[in-house]
Image: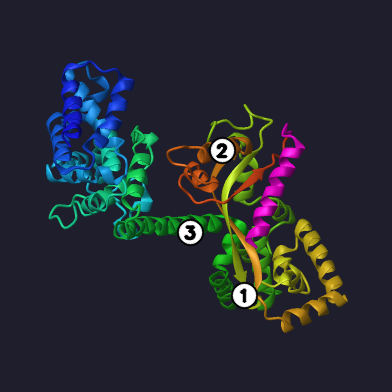
Amino acid sequence: GDDDDGTLSLVLKSLHSTQLSAPLRKVIAKLLPFLTYGQVAQSKELASYFDKYVNVESLGMMETFQKGNKSILMTTFVETAISLPPVSVCDNLRKELIQNGFVKKVLMYLMKDAPAKPAPWSPALYSKLEQQSDEKAKSDLKEEWRRYFNRPGLAYAIKVLTGLCSKHSQMQMLLAESGTGGADESPDLLTLCHWIESTSDNTSSGITTNDIGILAETLLDELKQDNQVTAVKVNLIRKKTRERKREIAEERRSKALVGMSAFGRLVGSAAAEKSTLATSANQPISGAPAPSDARSGSMLASMFGLSSFLSSSTQSRASSSAKDSSAETKAKPAWMAEMEAMDDEAFACAVCQEGRTLQPSELLGLYAFIKKVTISSAQGGAKSDIDGTNMLIALPKSLPLALATGEMSNLFRKGKTSADALLGSHALSAMAISSVGSSRNNYYITTVSAGNAIHCSCHTKAKAADRSNPKAPKSEWEGATLRNSRVTCNIILPLVSSKVSEVPLMAVEAALADVNTVVTNTL
């Protein structure tokens, strides 16, 4: 009763006259909420101290505060809010902080001067129709985000709201609904926090997020804790961004495949064949190959990166010399030359930021994501489609004149020999019977990577650190996803250099065994 009421008042009065050390201040900050004993009157008294001594506009100056009673009181109450435990004793204090306007002040400070659009260097936050093409608008928006990220006290404001909303449904609903339905274009709290958590530093423009991305992510996680309504809202916002990231990844992969001359020809082979046949019809050439030979030559040229050579040599076949043709066939596809010329130092560990030069004995690997896909035999999923049997059997009887060069003739002759051997074997007939009589699906593994490398040893250490984190323990691949630029991953593909390597053979075998285990479990 009276003793309980006096305990809180005595502690609060002592804060005015006593010089507290930092460790003692932290102890008192954690003790204050429990001195209310969950009673409304004492909770209201303590909440009034928050409103009186915490100047929200001065949150950014807490690190540079000089010693004094007012600064000690403000720091104490801010630490109390940050470390407020999610227990029923503190529920009345949270309600009083809502009623006296303290929560609204912190919220308004966080939302103040927030840009109306996401950071322009985070394309996943924009839909296809929302992409900005105006360079001046992009530059202005970058400056808005620079000023916002440089605002002092943002980290403390997010931490305070995180501590206050922990497992408290009323506080969670208040924050989740803040900013919605307004007439202005300012984003609501959930959207703003998602923009921040999905935005990284822009080194080219010298813009840094000051490490508030992980704080915004933690705030969203606390808002959805044990609250189905807010969880649906947060998950919906994050799902939209994940789907957009998947679209961007698909677009980039398609562009990369089209850029590879060995495969880009196949994408538009039908249109190219139509153009070639039309040219042959309008300008007949003596000794020209039949349409079937032209199609076969087009496919062969596509597979060996010689599509451009095919068109040029078809038009000038009668006047082209063997020397020019031989020089043309020796040209490598652009993507192959780029891969061969790639320096080993293009890959650096996401943890220690060192590559093969400084860590030659450490095995590097790429974070990747694999999943099982099902391909029916009718869609090219049969074994004969995968191992090239059908391609060999489909070779024409003779090589088109457009490709009749020394190197190409040798390749064709070897392929034709293998095809004849297959046609005369019993294995082919048995394979055909099994493929026709079997309607089962074929299962394969598809792999995609964002190109982020890591040492296998660094991944092991980071995994142990993530699991032993007392505040926010993470599973192996949750932590790996953060190190992989927030791209989902579930495997590490080892990078074995073709050059002299000091990586122990046991490390390579262990990494390959891990890959085999993951693939086996996935299948």
Say left or right for 442 vs 75: right
Q: Nearer the viewer, mark 1 or mark 2?
A: 2
Q: Mark 2 points at which residue?
A: 464
Measuring from the top left, give residue 417's x and y in whole percent: 85, 67
Q: Mark 3 points at which residue?
A: 250
Most foreground residue, 37 or 23: 37
Residue farthest bottom in this picture:
437
Q: Earlier in the sequence, mark 1 or mark 3?
A: 3
The image shows residue 58, relative to residue 260, as above or below, that is above
- Secondary structure under tag 2 reads helix
Numbered circle sitting on residue 379: 1
Measuring from the top left, give residue 386's x and y in whole percent: 70, 67
Numbered circle sitting on residue 73: none
Identify the image quadrant of the C terminus.
bottom right
Measuring from the top left, give residue 459's x and y in whole percent: 58, 39
- At 48% from the left and 59% from the top, the residue drawn is 250
Magenta span main SS: helix
Badge 2: residue crowd in 10 Å (few <14, some 14–19, many ≥20): some
- Secondary structure under tag 3 reads helix
Q: Which of marks 1 and 2 is nearer the N terminus?
A: 1
Q: Would residue 119 be visible to someone looking at this image?
A: no
Which span is picked out in magenta?
500-523
Most foreground residue, 445 or 162: 162
Give, as a three-letter code, the residue at label 3: Glu
